[in-house]
Amino acid sequence: MRKSYTIVGLIVLAVAIVMFVVLRKEAVLVDTTTPEKLTPVAQTADTFLVEWRADSMDRGDHDLYTQVHGMLVVSSNVSELQRGLIVYYEVPPQFLKENPNLLSPTLGRVVGLPGETVEIKKGKVYINDQRLDAFYGEATKYGMNKEQWYARENKRKQTKEQEQQTEAYYNLAMPTVTVEEGTIFVLVDAWWRGYDSSYFGLIPVETVKGIVLGYEES
């Protein structure tokens, strides 16, 4: 009798564990305020213009590229850095010394703020163990996530090597990083086309020269 009770108890425990796993919802941090596309804005006394000719922020429409959209209007008021903002900042000197051909100052999007942890698992960004639900919170190519990219590439023939590279990119991982006071964690929108905090670490706030507001009005 005792044996049967033990078996029943184990079955109940197993069912409880399965139900917990199935019903448990992933914690999500949602950003519904950051616009995916920049628009023309007027200049003010605290703004300056920046010419941008790199594709590290390209989401499929040559985003931020001056030759296509015009000069960038950047605000020198950096008192309130928030998640989702695109910042104009200086690359850490040591990394620039090792990679002298890099642009500096450069652009990146604020992802992690002081006191937070940032991690990348299977191509997705997690803030304090919460998945970042935002257009910039996962690996993309020309603005397309893994499902969208494969839907397009199914119409094309890829080599085995290309398939492996694509799979590896969309499953990128980065160990947990704690954002220290006085610093931010930035990522480019096109992870495969630029450098950011996943390569050279946290960015001191004092190296941020401005916040991108939009394109120069024509």
Image: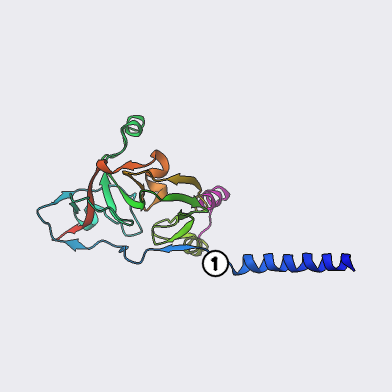
Task: Estimate the x, y position of residue 110 in percent, counting from the top left.
Answer: 33, 52
* Magenta residue span: 156-168
Task: Estimate the x, y position of residue 128 in percent, counting from the top left.
Answer: 45, 54
The quarter holding residue 37 reads bottom left
The residue sitting at 31% across, 43% down in the picture is 182
Residue beneath disc 1: 25
The residue sitting at 41% across, 40% down in the picture is 199
Q: Nearer the viewer, residue 182 or 97?
A: 182
On screen, residue 1 versus residue 137, left or right, reads right
- For residue 146, above or below residue 175: below
For label 1, the crowd category at 10 Å Cα-Cα, with few meaning under 14, some 14 to 19 and many 20 or more, is: few
Q: Quadrant of the C terminus?
A: bottom left
Q: Nearer the viewer, residue 181 or 194?
A: 181
Q: Main secondary structure of the magenta part?
A: helix
The quarter holding residue 138 reads bottom left
Membership of 27 in magenta stretch: no
* Mark 1: amino acid: Lys
